[in-house]
Image (cartoon, rainbow, N blue to C red):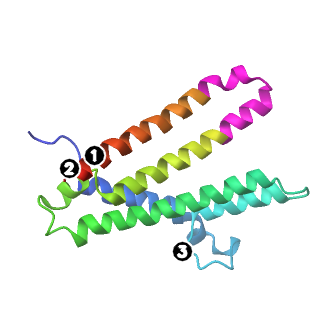
Amino acid sequence: MASIGMPRDAAVVLSLILECILYDEYCNRFPCLMPGLDHSSGFSIFMFLGTICALTYNRRSDRPSLVVAVLLLILSTVHVAVNIIHAEDGLMKYRDTFLGGPVAFFEDFSQITYLIKDTLYVMQTLVADGVVIYRCYIVWQSTRVIILPCMLCSSIFVVELAQWHIFASAISRA
């Protein structure tokens, strides 16, 4: 069966490049904004520092929002690192030893690095959705407004658990 579209290994390289551009862009373009950094950090750091400034400027710090900002920064940083490791594994480390080469490696969703990066992505989504749900409740002061978002957020969690179960059974069979 002929594959339609971009090969999986090319898609992984392109997604990694785009992710690193978004993660790295602002500190390299505007080094005067953050002179203390080594300028290998980027958009996530820029947005994090902007968030910290907005949360602490002329008022007492909003501790839960600070915790969420730090958590999202950590999750996005680890996600980029795991994505780089996953790409390195598929394109360099196992390219000659994995049956089918890099394309087959990236089509094998039971790879531990894929599972970790997918889990990190879902964790980021759940944290961000939790913030949106909290803000909706604060603005509307009604639980009726947040019922649907809570159900959708819960469904993301359930689907991730089902995915982990399916992949764990595939790993144990291999």
Q: Residue furthest top?
A: 144
Q: Is residue 7 visible?
A: no
Residue drawn at (79%, 33%) of the image: 138
Tell me, yes or no, whether the highlighted magenta stretch contains residue 108: no
What amino acid is at disc 2? Arg
Asked which quadrant contains residue 61, the reply is bottom right
Which quadrant would the N terminus be assigned to in this image? top left
Q: Is residue 147 magenta?
A: yes
Mark 2 and mark 1 residues within 8 Å of each other at the beta carbon: yes
Q: Find the magenta span and give its range.
A: 131-149
Residue where numbered disc 1 is placed: 169
Front tag of 3 and 2: 2
Residue 39 at x, y percent in the picture: 58, 75
Q: Depth check: 98 or 158 in front?
A: 158
* Image coords of residue 7 (percent x, y): 21, 51
In the rendered image, residue 142, in percent from the top left (x then y), is placed at 77, 23
33 is higher (above) or lower (below) than 60? below
Residue named by callout 2 = 173
Instruction: Please determine whether, in this image, residue 47 is positioned above or below residue 85.
Output: above
User: Tag count in the figure?
Assistant: 3
In three-dimensional space, the C-alpha distance between marks 2 and 1, rounded to whole angstroms, equals: 6 Å
Sequence-first tag of 3 and 2: 3
Residue occupying the point 26% across, 52% down: 171
Residue where numbered disc 3 is placed: 40
Q: CA distance from mark 1 to mark 3?
A: 39 Å
Mark 3 neighbour class, 10 Å CA radius: few under 14, some 14 to 19, many 20 or more: few
Image spot of residue 18 (x, y percent): 42, 57
Question: Which residue sits at x=45%, y=58%?
Answer: 19
Label 2: few (<14), some (14–19) or many (≥20) C-alpha neighbours in 10 Å: few
